[in-house]
């Protein structure tokens, strides 16, 4: 985490511009400017408000009107305040006996609405709500028929619907069934959902056919939620969902539980906005967990399906949404698989067909007819043409398309007329006056509310859900970015004990790094830029934009940022075990720093190198069309508690194809690791990272710094020295003493060969990180299986790894002399690039 951006001021203005454009375009993507509304949440039959899930459920028995009326109905109270859950909301209800007197809500905006009814029966002196049986109807749809809660367990029954409602009065009718004299309801939620949350058309699938057609007109239907499942995860309660939904685990629906296992929980944040999925499609929790194939290497055939069997209504039509997010693969394009609906229909799921990014949520929508079995089968299964043959699923939603019914409006209108006539006769002018009064009051009320509704944090977690727009105190929506990552300065001060120097774990040209603990208990690394260190706020924001999009198991994740006042603070996940170098050798410059490293076994070192290679491979090929790290070294590879390697400090790394205009605008990189080609072209490429990584490989093998001026001249430069031994075929003579005799010779040879390829003089001759990764995995396999094969067996047919001597000579040894301060080769970022260049150019010209 050190050596951040020594030269920022002139840093790539072009690039910045591009990013800013990108930033704004992705904001417009993210912010369909939706915020969860605060109307209508109705606490039926109550004269007091109840706050549940951060929403104010307004009591409907008060005289004031809040844009709705309860019709002709009577409030009832539970005689026993026995209801422990959600006190307030379920202790009262409204009892309806007259089917033609609906709840009426003022709807201000056309759109798809979430409509929920809460039923929690109790007995009161007046009524025993357990006896109720009734229908719930809205214009054109019968939402519930012969509904009864007689034998519900001791928890509220919540029924949820999605339907399109147009501006005007939205009426909800409760109609008692024949053998019941009343209906009841405890609470009602009606609020607009994000635009396009339900498509108008989707692929229509029938159980018995493999061919499909298109279903159009979903928006004119009412959808009833039957299942909402967080596959591979836990219950997600409404307070953790962006639309107050509930998600349940999938285990009860698995057809053969042994075919599936929960995927490793994804600790980063899913990357929204690249596909159709947004944080409102499903909450983070859904995308951070999954079920994947339970592959057992002892089993001969690992080619099977995972099937979920879900109870649905017979012979009905269902809207089915399947959620995916690849938290399973380590690299792009390694997994594709099939999704099956029943047994005939299949669909290819290729996470990278559309989105070139790991952990990017996406989903498929279908309209599926059910057969008369009462079950719907949904399966995922591997494909032979996939690199890694597995399959996964993150979430599942099934909603029934409700049948249309008689329009209550027509039936009700007659009796309504009658009531109104009576009213006007009896109430006369007073009625009209009071109506006007109410309307006037209502308008004022709504105006006041518009302002009041301005800031509420639905998910008050840092790094939780984020919103594309930020509400400013005066109510305008100002575009910012990744608000969810924003951490208040107070939290930072609390976490770092007011930037206690005792908690400082690093310092560099950019500022200081502190260890901190957020109130949630999460340990973090807090990187605070020096005021006036040169990085402008725009660059800072650009950086956050870039960093927040990069999520990978082997890259240190950004958790948050703070830009209050003049502060520019980045909050990263804390890496318990520090830097890779700390575990390899003692830094002799800094004598008080003791050798904290446990002795890393060869296996573990290989795993660390593989992890780091995966991280770099992702940077090169993943998000944003390729990012060059530009400062790969052993202090930028950090280890977590389990020694999982994560690459750090890939901040404002230039991305994209080489651009001649960028020449020599900035240098990042450290002596001893720097690509020799850099001195010729003054340009860093992905292959420069490969070179630096080659140096790290030697460092891991030999446990010595990349540069050490205290050594004899031919040993100062590790790359040079290591290569000379490699070419002599005597690499084993320079391995870390504590590893002597513990490395399988084949593994060592493969490893040396890989380092040699990385350190080739010409970038074009070096492998890419993907190839490096495979070679290292092979070296690990050789170590683990430790087969005693003939030495020649493991050499690749390509003998080109034998390096010409010139490679190492190309690295100007003069550079070591130039900078007197370098005595151990540690962390010597080129501070004054131009000085060095002039020297190097001279050197090169000789
Ligand atoms: C209930 O909430 C409404 C809307 O926020 C508010 O106007 C009213 O005063 C509240 N009533 C009570 C009794 O708190
Ligand atoms: C009220 O609560 C008491 C104890 O909590 C219980 O014994 C009684 O049966 C309850 N009465 C009703 C009507 O639920
Ligand atoms: C709402 O939808 C109705 C019917 O489609 C249309 O007539 C009306 O103009 C729309 N109103 C608004 C405000 O969009
Ligand atoms: C509801 O029950 C009544 C009789 O109680 C019956 O006639 C009607 O068909 C039922 N409706 C549905 C949708 O089951
Ligand atoms: C609930 O009611 C249904 C029919 O309405 C019945 O089949 C079922 O056995 C009841 N369950 C319990 C626990 O009473
Ligand atoms: C209403 O009648 C139907 C059939 O006649 C019966 O199945 C149902 O249990 C009855 N409901 C109530 C609340 O008595
Ligand atoms: C599927 O194909 C059959 C004949 O091949 C046809 O009769 C049927 O209508 C098709 N179904 C759909 C949904 O297109
Ligand atoms: C949900 O929210 C609660 C409280 O905010 C929290 O303790 C819990 O960990 C959250 N996560 C899930 C998956 O429910
Ligand atoms: C659902 O899948 C199970 C297991 O594959 C199978 O036994 C059952 O017949 C399937 N049902 C349907 C309706 O396809
Ligand atoms: C998975 O299920 C589908 C549909 O039932 C079937 O066609 C396919 O052969 C199954 N795949 C495996 C590997 O069993
Ligand atoms: C395939 O993916 C699994 C994780 O789901 C991983 O453990 C395994 O190493 C991968 N295999 C290959 C060849 O990448
Ligand atoms: C309020 O809005 C105005 C312009 O609409 C803006 O200039 C001002 O900075 C805003 N105030 C705050 C506190 O955001």
Image (cartoon, rainbow, N blue to C red):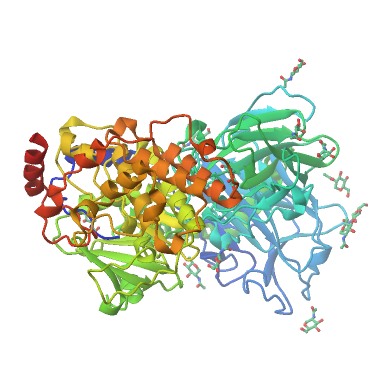
Please give the count of numbered marks on the rendered protein. 0
From the viewer's side, name the closer residue of 573 and 64.
573
In which quadrant will I find the N terminus? bottom left
Determine whether 337 is above or below 136 in the image: above
Answer whether residue 481 is visible to the viewer in this image.
no
Answer whether residue 761 is visible to the viewer in this image.
yes
Residue 703: name its quadrant. Answer: bottom left
Q: Percent from the top left, x then y, of residue 637?
A: 37, 56
Q: Residue at x 28, y 52 (%)?
A: 718
Q: Residue at x 10, y 48 (%)?
A: 836
Q: Percent from the top left, x then y, of residue 576?
A: 42, 68
Ligand 6, seen in the image, is in the quarter at: bottom right
Q: Residue at x 32, y 68 (%)?
A: 586
Determine whether 813 is above or below 569 in the image: above
From the viewer's side, name the closer residue of 217 and 496.
496
Q: Residue at x 16, y 32 (%)?
A: 661
Give left or right: position of 501 versus 305.
left
Q: Percent from the top left, x then y, of residue 632?
A: 31, 50
Q: Percent from the top left, x then y, of residue 693?
A: 34, 47
Give left or right: position of 837 versus 67.
left
Give left or right: position of 543 versus 340.
left
In which quadrant will I find the C terminus? top left
Give left or right: position of 28 versus 397.
left
From the viewer's side, name the closer residue of 174 and 117.
117
């Amino acid at each position: 985490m050190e050596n951040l951006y020594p030269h920022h001021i002139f840093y790539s203005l072009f690039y910045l511009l591009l990013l800013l454009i990108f930033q704004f375009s992705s904001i417009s993507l993210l912010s369909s400017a939706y915020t969860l509304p605060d109307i209508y949440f109705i606490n039926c039959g109550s004269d007091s408000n109840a706050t549940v899930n951060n929403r104010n459920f307004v009591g409907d028995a008060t005289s004031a009107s809040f844009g709705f009326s309860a019709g002709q109905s009577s409030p009832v109270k539970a005689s026993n305040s026995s209801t422990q859950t959600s006190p307030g909301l379920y202790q009262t209800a409204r009892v309806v006996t007259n089917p033609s007197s609906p709840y009426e809500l003022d709807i201000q905006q056309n759109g798809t609405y979430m409509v929920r009814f809460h039923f929690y029966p109790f007995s009161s002196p007046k009524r025993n709500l357990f006896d109720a049986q009734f229908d719930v109807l809205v214009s054109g749809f019968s939402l519930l028929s012969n509904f009864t809660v007689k034998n519900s367990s001791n928890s509220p029954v919540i029924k949820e619907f999605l339907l399109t409602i147009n501006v005007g009065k939205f009426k909800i009718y409760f109609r008692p069934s024949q053998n019941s004299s009343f209906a009841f309801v405890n609470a009602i939620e009606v609020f607009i959902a994000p635009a396009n949350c339900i498509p108008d058309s989707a692929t229509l699938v029938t159980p018995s056919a493999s061919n499909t057609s298109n279903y159009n007109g979903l928006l004119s239907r009412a959808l009833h939620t039957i299942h909402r499942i967080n596959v591979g995860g836990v219950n997600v309660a409404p307070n953790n969902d962006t639309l107050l939904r509930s998600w349940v685990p999938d285990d009860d629906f698995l057809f053969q539980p042994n075919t599936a296992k929960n995927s490793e929980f994804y600790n980063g944040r899913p990357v929204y906005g690249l596909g159709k999925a947004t944080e409102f499609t499903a909450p983070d929790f859904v995308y951070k967990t999954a079920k994947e194939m339970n592959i057992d290497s002892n089993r001969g055939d690992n080619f099977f399906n995972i099937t979920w069997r879900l109870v649905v209504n017979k012979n009905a039509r269902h809207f089915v949404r399947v959620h995916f997010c690849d938290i399973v693969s380590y690299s792009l394009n390694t997994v594709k698989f099939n999704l099956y609906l029943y047994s005939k229909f299949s669909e290819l799921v290729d996470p990278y067909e559309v989105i070139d990014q790991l952990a990017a949520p996406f989903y498929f929508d279908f309209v599926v007819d059910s057969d008369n079995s009462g079950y719907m089968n949904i399966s995922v299964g591997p494909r032979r043409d996939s690199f890694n043959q597995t399959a996964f699923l993150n979430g599942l939603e099934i909603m029934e398309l409700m049948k249309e019914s008689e329009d209550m409006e027509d039936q009700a209108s007659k009796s309504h007329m009658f009531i109104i006539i009576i009213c006007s006769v009896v109430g006369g002018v007073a009625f009209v006056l009071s109506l006007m009064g109410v309307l006037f009051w209502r308008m004022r009320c709504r105006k006041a509310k518009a302002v009041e509704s301005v800031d509420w944090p639905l998910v008050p977690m840092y790094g939780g859900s984020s919103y594309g727009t930020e509400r400013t105190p005066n109510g305008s929506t100002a575009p910012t970015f990744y608000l969810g990552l924003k951490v208040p300065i107070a939290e930072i001060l609390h976490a770092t004990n007011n930037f206690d120097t005792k908690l400082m774990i690093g310092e560099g040209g950019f500022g200081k790094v502190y260890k901190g603990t957020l109130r949630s208990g999460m340990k973090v690394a807090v990187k605070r830029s020096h005021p006036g260190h040169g990085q402008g706020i725009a660059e800072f924001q650009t950086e956050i934009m870039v960093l927040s999009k990069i999520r990978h198991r082997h890259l240190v994740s950004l958790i948050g940022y703070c830009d209050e006042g003049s502060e520019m603070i980045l909050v990263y996940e804390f890496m318990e075990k520090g830097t890779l170098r700390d575990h390899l050798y003692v830094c002799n410059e800094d004598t008080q720093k003791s050798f904290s490293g446990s002795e890393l076994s060869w296996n573990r070192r290989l795993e660390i190198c593989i992890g780091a290679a995966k991280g770099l491979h992702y940077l090169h090929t993943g998000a944003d069309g390729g990012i060059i790290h530009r400062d790969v070294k052993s202090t930028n590879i950090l280890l977590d508690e389990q020694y999982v390697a994560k690459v750090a400090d890939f901040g404002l790394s230039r991305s994209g194809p080489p651009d001649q205009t960028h020449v020599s605008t900035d240098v990042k990189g450290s002596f001893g690791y720097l690509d020799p080609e850099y001195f010729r072209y003054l340009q860093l490429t992905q292959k420069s990272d490969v070179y630096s990584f080659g140096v790290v490989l030697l460092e891991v093998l030999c446990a010595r710094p990349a540069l050490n001026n205290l050594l004899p001249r031919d040993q100062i430069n590790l790359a040079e020295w290591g290569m000379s031994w490699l070419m002599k075929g005597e690499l084993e003579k320079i391995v870390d003493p504590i590893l002597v005799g513990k490395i399988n010779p084949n593994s060592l040879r493969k490893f040396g060969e890989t380092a040699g390829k990385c350190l080739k003089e010409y970038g074009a001759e070096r492998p890419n990180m993907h190839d490096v990764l495979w070679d290292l995995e092979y070296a690990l396999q050789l170590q683990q299986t430790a087969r005693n094969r003939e030495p020649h067996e493991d050499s690749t047919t390509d003998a080109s790894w034998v390096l010409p001597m010139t490679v190492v000579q190309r690295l100007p040894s003069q550079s070591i002399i130039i900078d007197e301060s370098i005595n151990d080769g540690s962390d010597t970022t080129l501070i004054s690039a131009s000085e060095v260049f002039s020297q190097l150019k001279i050197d090169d010209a000789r």
